[in-house]
Amino acid sequence: MKSLVFCLLLLSQLAWAHDYPDTYRYQVLVTDKTTSTVTQSSFLSIPNIVHAIHIKNLRKIKASVVVTTDWVKPYFTAWANRENENKYTLNFWGGLARIPGMNDEAFAITACHELGHVIGGTPRIKIKEFLWSSAEGQSDYFATSVCMKNYFKFVNQTKKLTIPKKLSETAFTLCRTTYSNELEFLICLNTNKGIEGFAAMLEHLSQYKEQLSIETPSKKQVKVTTFDSYPDTQCRIDTLFQGSLGQPRPACWFAK
Ligand SMILES: [Zn+2]
């Protein structure tokens, strides 16, 4: 949501210790070099697919959603907004998709996260203006425990899922031992390819001050659920990972 922009401004005060030019701290232009594999075409189609395959869920809560995308905008932003009682927008700027290390699967997780604010359920944000919105941690959890599963089932109908190259062994092993069904196994692997891209995005947003990995889960245990802010970044990766394995929400943000 919008607080991402705020965080980014704060972080830009820190030194930039990376190979990318200084401007990459806050923007990646269409013409800039990047290792992101998201194309203009996938940037436009992915949020619309994520939206279309959840129309029934939206109808259940009588909500309508409009997706807006702006490929050229260089800044790192995606957000969900409630326009009026039943109408929501999900918004995506191209700079976010061009962050080095991003991939289509990670961008789909981002789209699922934004949709998750609308249909991700409880816990919700407790701030008055955002009572309609699932909490950040819950939107992450919805993204991989529900939305990415639906997304890949849909994608698999036209382009059969395959085993991603260079996936972490931990992800591979846990997906294999969790899912005996072949399609569910492939969905788990490809979701984890997205989690790796998502981690690269969060590392970039933190100006490479931290390294994130499913191998180093947060040790934090909250007594009260984190309702009104982002869980810390490692905790977000843990949440996505747990969701991909059908495991409960982690204790680093969710209190039972
Ligand atoms: Zn959010």
Image: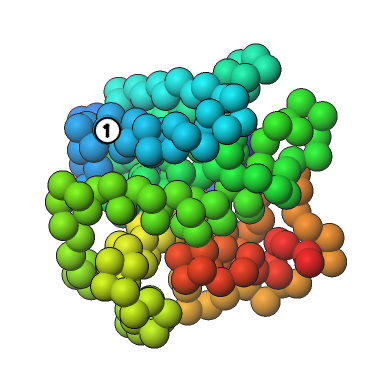
Q: Name the residue under label 1.
A: 45
Does residue 155 sit above or below 88 in this rendering? below
Residue lying farthest to the left in this orientation: 159
Question: Residue 209 at x, y = what percent?
Answer: 52, 60
Other residues around mark 1 within 10 Å, as few (<14) / some (14–19) / many (≥20): some
Looking at the rendering, in which quadrant would you find the C terminus? bottom right
* Residue plotted at (53% across, 77% down): 216
Percent position (x, y) of residue 210?
52, 64
In the image, farthest residue toward the top:
84
Residue at mark 1: C-beta within 8 A of ligand 1: no
Residue at 75% across, 54% down: 226
Q: In this figure, what is the number of numbered marks?
A: 1
Query: Residue 244 location, x and y as percent?
Result: 45, 65
Look at the image and tell me whether residue 202 can be seen: no
Quadrant in which the N terminus appears: top right
Residue 7: x %, y % from top left: 61, 41
Residue at figure coordinates x 36%, y 24% from the top left: 69
Name above or below for residue 84 compared with residue 78.
above
User: Disc 1 on helix, strand or loop?
Assistant: helix
Left or right of residue 10, residue 188 in this image: left
Left or right for 21, reference 113: left
Q: Which of 107 and 26 is in front in this view?
A: 107
User: Can you see residue 90?
Assistant: yes
Tell me what residue is drawn at x 56 percent, y 71 percent: 247
